[in-house]
Every structure is written in C-alpha cells, then in structure tokens.
Amino acid sequence: MTDTTWDPTKPILEIENLSISFFTRLREIPAVMDFSCSVMAGESMGLVGESGCGKSTVALAVMRDLGKNGRIVDGTIKFKGRDLTHMGEEELRHIRGSEIAMIYQEPMASLNPAMKIGAQLAEVPMIHQGMGRDEAWNLARQIVADVRLPDPDRILQAYPHQLSGGQQQRIVIAMALMSKPALLILDEPTTALDVTVEAGIVDLVKDLGHKYGTSMLFISHNLGLILDVCDRLCVMYSGEAVETGDVIEVFDKMRHPYTQALFRSIPLPGADKNSHPLVAIPGNFPLPHERPKGCNFGPRCDYFQDGRCNAAEVPMFPVPGDDRHATRCIKWTEIDWDAPMTLKASKPKTPIGKVVLKMEDLRKYYSVSSGAFGGGSAKVVKANETLSFEAREGETLAIVGESGCGKSTFAKVLMGLETATSGSILLFDENVQSTPIQQRNTNTVSSVQMVFQNPFDTLNPSMNVGRQIIRALEIFKQGKSDAERYARMLELLDLVKLPRAFADRMPRQLSGGQKQRVGIARAFAGGAKVVVADEPVSALDVSVQAAVTDLLMDIQRENKTTLLFISHDLSIVRYLSDRVMVMYLGHVVEMGTTDQVFQPPYHPYTEALLSAVPIADTKVIRKRIVLEGDIPSAMNPPPGCPFQTRCRWKSQVPGGLCDIEMPPVQVLAGGHQLKCHLSAEVLAAMEPVIQIAAE
Amino acid sequence: MNTELLSWGQIIARILQQFLPVWIALIITFTVSIRYKRKLGLYGKLFDSPVGMVGFLLVMFWVFTAIFADFIITLDPIAQFGRVKNPLPGTPLVDPKDGQYAYFLLGGDHLARDVFSRVVMGARRVLTIAPAATTFAFIMGATLGLPAGYFGGKLDTVLSFLANLVLAFPVILLFYLLVTPEIRNTGIPVVLAAVLFIFPVIFFCTLFNSRFFTNPPKRNLYVGITLVIGLWAYFGLAFNLDPLGVWSMDPNLLNVFVSVVFVNSPTVFRIVRGIVMDLKARDYVAAGQTRGESAWYIMLWEILPNARGPLIVDFCLRIGYTTILLGTLGFFGLGVSPESPDWGSTIDDGRKLLSLYLHPAITPALALMSLVLGLNLLADGLREESLKD
Amino acid sequence: MLKFVARRLGVMVLTALALTFVVFYLTNLPPNLEKLARTEGSVRMTDQAVADWIVGNGHGGSVFGRYAEWIGIAPGWTLTDEKGVTRGRCIAAGSDPAAAPNYCGVLQGEWGFSTVFKKPVLESVLQKLGSTGWLMMWVMIVMVPVSLIMGVLSGMREGSRLDRSLSIIAIATTATPEYVSGVILVAIFASATAGISPILNEWGWISGRTLFLGTATSAMDGITFWNFALPVLTIALYGIGYIARMTRASMTEVMTQQYIRTARLKGVRFRDVVLKHALRNALIAPFTVIMLQFPWLLNGVVITEALFNYKGFGWTLVQAAGNNDIDLLLGCSVVAVLVVLVTQLISDIGYVFLNPRIRLA
C-alpha cells in the first residue's frame, strides 16, 4: 500500500500551521493554533503538555476524527506527502488502521465488549489487505505473541472483560500493529495503568517501534515517559507548540520559559520540601476563549515584559546550532537560561512530635459473593493484613502502592467508614478501631479528615463553595452563630490562598487545582490533626501539583498536622514524606524513613516500583527492571509471599520458601522493616536503582 | 332564530377568539423567557432547542387553558342543551337564552352537551390531578429509592421485590380491582391513602431535620411548620377529617388518585435507586461520610440535588404518562363520575357512535394527544439541553 | 447458570403467589361477595340471607384459608346442610361426595365456573387467549422490526435530519395512547362520514362504505387485512415509539463509545461499524425493554379489544370485571401474571446471553 511517489527521506508526517476550532452554539473555540511539526520515518515524536493544551486534538486531527463540532480551520497535515485535510471519507478509510493507527488511553473502553479479541484483531487485515478469515486469525495469533501475551489461542477466543488492564492495552497495541502501519499515534497509552504495568507497556512500544520501523506520535503529560520513549518532542501550551526539538536538547537546554517552569515544578531527585522546594507556576491555565493577546504564557511568565510579550502573536524562532530546535518566545535570546533558579527561602523542617496515631496488627477482611448473580460461595478478600505502624505529630507518612494494595481500605478503616476485622487503632490514645464514624464524637471526627483524589468529584456540584465549607463548620460545632461561621469560612479560603469571592462560586466555575484547595479547606475546617490525603494531586496537572503540595506542606507546618499521604507516585513521595510505607496486596512489604526506602537494600517490589517510575532528568541513570505479568487480584492472592509471582529475586531464596510461607518482617538498621525471605547478605549486596550521573 | 351551521372558517375564528386570554399569557411568557434566557439556567436553555420550545408551548397552552377555563368556555360543560343528539360542529342552539353563547362550536355529544366547553374544562381536571399525582409518586419513590440505593443489602432486596411486584401487575387489572365502587366501602383506598400521603410529611421532616439539626431553633421552626401544615393536609385528604374543611378530596377522586400514585411510584423508585447507586461512589459523598454526616443528610442534600437532571426529565414524561392513565380510567368508566368532563370518559362516550359522529370523540382525543406530546417534547428538549455543555 | 435460573424461578414463584394473593384478596372482598350473593341468589335477599349464602358457599372463613383452597394446597371446603346433602368446593352438583377429590384448586386445573359465559373458566380463558395470541403475534411482527430499525437508524447519526424526523415520529406515537390512536385511525380509515373512505367510495375505488372495518368482530372467524390491520396498528403504534426511543438512546450511547471510535479509526466502513460493532451492544437494552413491555402491552390489548369489539383475552377481562365474575377474573389474573413473569424470565436469560460481560463462567 506504500505510495510510490513518497520519498522516504522526507517526513512521514508533516503538519504545517494547523489551526483547529470547535464550534459551539455561542462561539468558536480555538483548540489548536498555528501548530507545526514533522515526524521522520522511524522517528518517535512526543507531544507533551497539560490537559487542555490541545495535544489530543492534534492527534485526532491527524486521524481526521474531530467529531461534529471540530473543524480544521487552517493549515495542512501531510502524510507521506498527501494532504489529509482535503481527503474524502473513502480515501481516509484506507489510511486509517492500515497506515496510521491509534492507541488510546482507556484500553477497556477501546475494545468492543461484545466481540471476541480475535475477531477484533483479524478485522483489520481483512478490511485493508482483503485477507481471508483464517489467514487473518493466524496473523492475529502471531501479533498477540509479539506483544508478549501468554497463551495467544486462549486470548483470541476471549472477550475483553476477561483480560486485565495491562493485557487489554497490549491487545490494543496488537490491533494497531495488525497491518504494520507507517505511523502510530499513542494518546496517553499508559495513564490508566499501574506504574509497574506501564513500564512493561513502554518497553513493548519501544521495542516494537524499532522492530517494525514505525514512526510514532506519542502524547503524554509525563515528561519522564517522553524521555524514555521519544527521540524528539514538542511542548504545547494552550493550543500552541511553544518549544520543539530533540528530547535531550530540550531537556538540557530548554529555550522557553514554560518548559523551564514545567521542569522546576516537577519533583526530580534532589528536590526536597525543606531545602529545595518546588517552584509552582503562578496563576491558571487560560480558558480557550480567554487567551491573552500575544504570548499565551505571558501572564504566568517570570520574564514577562509589558508591551512586547503581549503586543502581537509570537512566531516560532529556530534555535541555531541544535537539530530543528525552535521556541515560541520573543525574548529567548535575552534570557539567561543557565542562571540558577532563584531559591525560595528554604523552610524550617517541621519538628516531629509525639505519637498521635498507632495501628497494631490491623486486619480488614471483606466477604464477597462471587459470580454475577450472587450465587456461588462467599470469598474472603483480605484487604489489609497485619498492618502495624505509628505516625507522629507533624510527620508525613507516605503510603505507597498500586491498585489493589489495600491503601484505600486502610483509609476507610482509619476514618471509621468501615470497622476493622481485628487489631487496634489508637488515635490520641483513644481506641477507635471498632467505633464506626457515627459513634465517634465530634472531636475525634473533626481531627481526622481526608483530602480526596478526584478534584471533579470532591465537591458537591450543586452547592456553592462557601456553603460546603460552612456545612463542615456546622457539623464540627465551630463558631457560635452563622455570622461567626461565615467569617471563619472566609479565613479558611485565605488559608488555602483562594480569593474570598470564591465563596459564592459553584464548583463547576473552579479549576481542578482550585477545587482541590477547597477540599483542603473543608478538611481543615475542624482543625484536623491527622489528614489522610488520598492521591490529592495525582489527577492535577504538573504545574498545579506543585502549588497544591506546597499548600499542604505549609498548612502542615503551621498546624503540626500529621499527614498520611497515599500515593503511587514515588517522585512526589520522595519529595515530601518523612517516612514511607510500601504496600502490596494488603501487606506492608517495606517501611522506613524516606532515605532508607529509596536506597538499597530494597524490598524486591520497591526496587521494581522505583525502576518503573519514569524520571524527567537526563542525568539520572535508571536500572530497568520490568515486572512480568499483572498484579494478582486481591480476591485470589498467590500462596506464600504475595509478591512471589512477579519477583526477580525469588531464585535467591533457598528451598522455594517464597511459594509456601509468608515472609517474616526483618528489622534492619535504623528500624527499617522489610517483609522478605531474602537473607541479610543478599539484601546488603543490592545495587541502587537510581543514580545521578556526575555532571 | 337562525338555523345556519357555522362554516369551518367561522368556527376556527370563534375558537381562536375564545382562547384570547391564553394567547396573551403565552406571548408574555415567551417574550420574557426568550429575553432573559441566558439568566434562567436550564429553563432558559430550553429556548435554544426548537423541540423543547414547541413542547413547552403545547404544555403552557393547556396550562393557561386550565387556568382561564372559566373565561374560555362558551356553555356550561355539564348542562344539556336541546334534544338533538350529537349536534354537528357549528350548530346553533335551539333557543338560546339571553347572553348565552349561541353555537355548539365543536358540536355536542350524545346528551347534547357542548364538546368545546367540556374539553376546556377537562384540561383543568387533568392538569390538577396529573401533576399532583406525579408529585406524590415522586416523593414516595424518592423516599424509598434513596435508602434502597444508598444502603443496599436486605432493605434494597425487600423494597426492590415489592417494586417489581407492583410493576409485574398488569396496570389495567390493578385498576379494575382498585378503582371500583365496592372497594370504597371496604376502606382500602383510605388505608392506601393513609400510607401514601404520609410520605411527603416524612420526607420534608427528614429533609429539614438532617440539615438543621446543628441549629435546633431553626430546625424546630421548619419541622414544626411542616408538621402542622403536613398533618393538617394529611388528615383532610386521607381521612376527610379537616376541621376547617380546607383540605378534602372527593372519595371517588381519592380512589383514582391513590391508584395512580401507587402505579407510578415503583418506576420512580427504580430510577432514584439507580441514580443513587451511581452517585454514592462520588468523593463528595465520602467527604460527607468522613465528617460524620447522617445517612439521610447525605441522601437528601448531597445526592438528591445532583440527581435532579434525570428526575426533572422523567417528571415531565411521567405527567404525560399519568395523563394517559387517567384517560384509560375514564375510557373504562372507572371511578370518575359520568358527568365529569374528563377527557378519557368523553372519548369513551363518543366512541360508541364513532362511525357516524366523529366530533364528540375526536376533539378530546386530539386534546389529550397534544398535551402528552407537548410533555414528551418538553422532556426531550430538557434532556438534550441538560446534556449540552 | 443453573443456579441463576433456579434463583430466578424461586423469585418468580414468590412473585406469582404474592400477586395472585393480592388479586384473590381484592376480588373476594365482602362487598364483592355480597354482590355475588345477590346475583346468584336473589336481589331482594335480606342481609342475613346474604351472610348465610356467603358462608354456605365456602366464602366464609379466613381469606388465607380460602386462598389456599383456591390455589389447591388446602383441601376444598365441604358442608353438610340440614337436609344431609353434602356440598363442597370439589363436589360437582349431584355427584357422590365420597368420590370427590380433596384438593381442587388452580394447580389441579379447577379454575372455577364463569357466571358470565356459563362455562368453565379454564376453557373460556384458553379460548380467548388463543384469539389474543393472534393479535399479539401480528403486533409483534409489525412492532419489533419497525421500532428497532427506526431506533437504529436515528441513533446511528445523532442529530442528523433523519434522526430528528424519526425521533419526532417516535415521540408522537408514544404520546398517543391506544384509545386515542384507535379513534383517530377509525376516523381516518373506517368512518363512513370522514377520513378517506367517503372519497374512495365516491371514486369507486372501494365497494364497501369504508376502507377498513371499524370493528374486528369478524376477525374472530377469519383474520383478513381489512378487519385486523387497524387493531394491530393501534397497539403497535404506541409500542413502536417507546421501543424506538429506547433503541435510539441505547444506540446513541453506544455510538459515542471509545470502541466505536476504535473501529472507525481501524478503517471499518460506517455500515459495518453500525452492523458489526454497534448493533449487538445497542440491542441489549431494548431487548429487555421489549420483554418487560408485556404487562403494559396487556393494557393496550384490553383497550383495543374493547374499542374494536374483538372478543379476546382483554375483552374477557373487561366482561369479568364488569360483571363481578370472580372466578373468571381470578383466572384472567393468573394468566396475566404468568405471562408477565415468563417474559421477565426470558428477558433475564436473554440478557445474559446477549451480554458477554456477565456470562457466567
């Protein structure tokens, strides 16, 4: 199907001055403006930016699938020299799936639930190559083996819901590769997956890209992932490409203030909440119809110069010397890019006080009936097994783990939404393990509060912000009169650095970061002493993450709050926590101070987790440890050590102990705890996963 | 005395003239609404959708007709005029008294009653019973559906079983069993009414208590007012025991009303339960739980307001469905007095001579159809607009 | 799977018992029995005589006991009067009481005797059910394909002109209950004075006075297009709109799913996207809806049979209720409840088969 007129030394995809708008009843909303980029054969191009920057719109425009309201207003998209923007439906259909294929964020949603995997895969060559059914199924079998799925025959006969998330994403990749496309578009392909599963997928994509010589357009918000996968990247901000070039060059010699600010706001190794705090980007992402004149980043930029930056639209300036490096900054030659970042005053370390929370041997079992209709025998899910730890005043304890590790159950038990099966929880020396929240007194309830993960869910959409905070004050018996509570509410808004006018706003008028701030204000309404933060920033954009984390840290310093920070993101955990607890399938596998956990000896799971997290720093050298398979279901945990099915150190334990026996907790120097059968010698010989190359 | 029939042109002109108050009211409503549509939330958005606007127009036409019915009717809807059966549209009255309207605008029925006036008065009847019955069905469905969806478990199993029981009952059979003159003697309708009508009182008391229990004086005030008005109305409507005689319901009507509420509430129950099961996993619900809110506060103040979109749409559809049900009852001559200008019973009266005289049946049939169509279009418009942006 | 069916069956039996009990209770209320006594005995009976008649014919005692007798799980009542004649539920008039069976309820096939038709209930119900069966069959044949096609066509391109017009038609038909559409259909097609018949007659296109027949009584003997089309259309119209809207909603939802986009961006032809990828997923919801429509289709059947004077099941129900024929009404209820429950079971099982996500391992 290769077009003979196309010269392989020319770019395979060439986008020039592309502008895309969405048309609503009220107005035209420009989503992408003046976007240009080119992808050469075999090259992988990263598109990076925060949500709403237009990166996915570009991808859909390449597929010419912008929906009813979206339209390409200007510019061209040339694929192998042919302009896609003026192509008819029938011609497009021949290109889609055969020459350009796409992989999406939600693997489950992108597979047809009522069709067998095999049929969905075989369809592609049957449409495009006119292949016969049997031949197509054989090809499907071969490609399923290529994406390293076990037992391809069984998988071909399965329905999507019978596979795990990781397996589904491999199938989506297989589907995209069925007719060996020249260009593969990946739209956040791993965002919905756990980190250790993500690592496997990323490896697979890289390998297959090389094997088939496919060019890639890789869309992600994660700079670390882009560094892992791509050769070149294009940073987007508010509908425009602001900087583009070779990955290494852009990472090391960025020439746009936004790129620089982005790197300063993500927690890289070396950042520390006290001595090297993150620098958040001030302000908010502009709404598409409220973009400023001139440079879109102007209002948030440290180098902003009135009358120049906001005078006229800024074109792309090539950066000489580098390979196709360009920036959309009018002042890029004037800024001293190597100047060290002006440090915010480093903050004093919060003193750690007395123990406020102590859990001992906590267990939480659920009994679930299996089968869709309640038939079958009831199964016991061990969501938490023998959890013991203590947390002190002013301390940040991070709880790390992937889906199904029991961290959310733990939070529920602590909050009193569920009661523990056994064990004890001592909160300020009061025993609360079997007291459900309705029976706890107001004091206890108001002193343990929670900050939730999803900013779009955390506030009641039909109640204004002020009311929601006042309600918390009423429940916590704060203030004597309505007026007093109103005043206290305004103070709380000040505390989370939101304008007082927000009291009358509805949640839908707030951005994600602002909602999360309101959530924090609400949690502190009753002067909370212990705050459980369940992935409070994972759904936020990187530039906002830093600001929200900072806010949490500031409030903690001021109020000596104990923060239980639940997260799967090890970068942020390293940045802000004092102690870390790593959980896997309901078990605490490792616990210690941040330094202990992030340095060898590791628990084998921690080691894999550390290696799996992509780091956006070219100086960091990471050992690649890719775990096989998926996280086992908590309904059906493996015998012996919970991690034994995926552990690469298993062979070092004599006597197959891992298969049979639950490992004991080893206490190493400094109170560092590991739940592992590995001997002290083996542990001592472990090498660090992350090393920072000497400059 | 004249014996000339009016021409169709004259009839239409005269009918349009009779509806004058309705036209004025409609013009005012639409001008004001369209001018301020950006400030009116979902209601305002309705005027962006042609379908919704047409639906709203039809519904409001009948609403205003019901309101101004006394000015619109030409003749007494219950009285009989002359001995000629089924006079054709435009027939003059045999010997009109002074000041009496001189024509059967849309003809007369088999008892020589004026069809036009009966249909107009019928609108008032339908538009008081149907929305009221639907409201009661919603309150009952919500009061039971909220805990069933929120708590799940045994409570849900039992309530869902009961709801499915009512749903599995063929509606017509239920009506034949429930809406009979004999059953009134047994007191079953009163018992049912006693159960159904207590729900609004419980609902509003819980609503205010869960919200204001932190502020006892305010709580006592609200709950007190609810109890006074609620119980006063309750005893009046269910047992006809209102000492002041403000609240009362004709036993016939009570029977019909109770049956209609009874048939409608299980569907509402299922809808509410479904929405609650979806919404209870939201973080703001968890936030309420972690600050120790009562289950009823969470259900009534955190979950219910966020379920309003689909519920409003269903409310419109359900008024239409209730209208159809009331018509069905009338069609079978169940529970409504034979004199009443009810649309359903008028159709039933007219159908017997359908192949000879169309007009007595077709006018109420078209009236009922246009009202239900309007409600359906309105619901469709609301649904579409609430899904947009 | 077996376990699931067994559970469903259990719930079904429980539902059937509860529903029939409610019907039994409501039909055997004292006022109904008094009315029965006066129609069976004489209108001028004294109150005392009425009470005696009720007790003497086995209608005394607790309602639970009588219900159990009627179902056939308790022995039928027997009474020996002063003259030494033993009568009882299970004893046919003039037969030997000793030879009569102990149990004679619905389960034993003894459905009682209809006072209106002067025939055993089971016989008349089954016969009438047959007539209605034909009606329902034609309704299904018309309604299901038309509504599904309408729904799929309008749902596959939401907001298109085709969608808008089909949706309006669907909404219009759901807004038209059977007693309205029946009247309008008769007015247009079967009226000697209005609609198209007089015109056709004038032109000499039809020999009779009307194009279609305004009643379906003749269809009892032989179904023809001219006597059956209007009743079938009357029932089908209301259902068409409802099912078409369900299908449309389900189809539009499916069409916005990611996997449809995946299919489109695989290069699948639009026709195949609809037929191979969307259809099966989109039909899961309407299938259940169609099956659950039965209790409500029965409504339409009753109205239409009354309107067109077609002597089927619905007509029988009206007669039974109107004439206080308790046994017949009970018989009709049992049939109605059973039909509804069986369709629900079919709907549940069908759902499991259509939806691979919940297929049991």
Image (tube, rainbow, N blue to C red):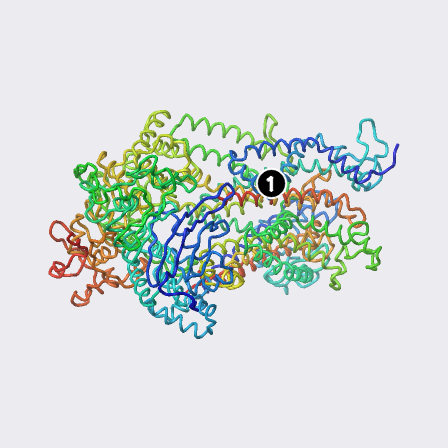
- Residue B103: percent from left, percent from top: 81, 35
| A96 over B242 or under it: above or below | below
Q: Is residue B248 left or right of residue B146?
A: right
Q: Residue at x 59, y 38 (%)?
A: B131
Name the one closer to the observer, C54 or C68: C68
Q: Residues within 10 Å of mark 1 (few under 14, many from 20)?
A: many
Q: Is residue A398 left or right of residue C339?
A: left
Name the one closer to the observer, A449 or A114: A114
Q: Residue at x 31, y 41 (%)?
A: A451
Instruction: Name the image quarter holding residue C44.
Output: top right
The amino acid type found where label 1 is placed reads Met
Name the one closer to the observer, C164 or A426: C164
Residue B291 visible in the snapshot? no
Name the chain under label 1: B
**Does dot 1 land on a helix, a strand or a loop?**
helix
Quadrant housing the N terminus of chain B: top right
The residue where tag 1 is placed is: B53
Residue B53 visible in the snapshot? yes
- Residue A473: percent from left, percent from top: 34, 32
Q: How many marks?
A: 1
| A675 over A529 or under it: above or below | below
